[in-house]
Amino acid sequence: MILIDPPAVPRWDRMWSHLASDTSYDEAHEFAAAHGIPARGWDRDHYDVPDDFYDVMVAAGAVPVSSRELVSALRAAGLRRPKAQFQR
């Protein structure tokens, strides 16, 4: 399932959501590509999605969840890649 949290992260003069799959990275990549999210938006285990894409992603089938629910779903699926893991 594709999940998206509310746009709550400020960066580059706009707010951002996170879009992820609780099934596989491939599912996230396929959904993103099919809906115009550039590959450069991928950040370890999710896509950063600008706030003006939020409603479009929900209309396309992404399930709105809280940020905490998104992270919990990634952890439960074994797909969470914390930033600290990649800074070594």
Image: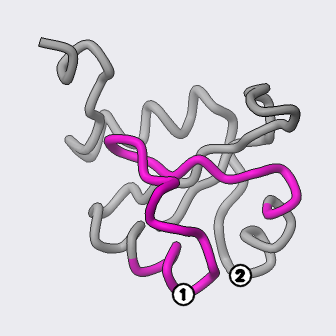
Return the x and y of residue 36 as percentages of the image width and height: 63, 79
- The reply, left or right, for residue 23 in relation to residue 43 is left
Let me know if residue 37 is in the magenta part.
yes
**Highlighted range, magenta:** 30-53
Q: Residue furthest left?
A: 88
Examine the image and state in which quarter residue 80 appears: top left
Q: Residue at x 67, y 77 (%)?
A: 61
- The reply, left or right, for residue 47 in relation to residue 16 is left
Check disc 1 and report its element: helix, strand or loop. helix
Return the x and y of residue 4 as percentages of the image width and height: 64, 52
Q: Residue furthest bottom?
A: 34
User: Camera-side residue: 7 or 78?
Assistant: 7
Q: Residues within 10 Å of mark 2 (few under 14, many from 20)?
A: few
Q: Is residue 60 above or below residue 48?
A: below
Return the x and y of residue 52 as percentages of the image width and height: 88, 59
Question: Going from the N terminus, do you reach mark 1 or mark 2 first?
Answer: 1
User: Which amino acid type is marked by label 2?
Assistant: Ala
Check the image and tell me how it is coloured: one colour
**Do labels 1 and 2 touch, CB within 8 Å?**
yes
- Which quarter of the rendered picture does the C terminus lie within? top left
In this rendering, the label closer to the viewer, 1 or 2: 1
Let me know if residue 2 is in the magenta part.
no
- Residue holding disc 1: 34
- The reply, left or right, for residue 14 in relation to residue 16 is right
Q: Is residue 81 above or below residue 25?
A: above
User: Camera-side residue: 28 or 52?
Assistant: 52
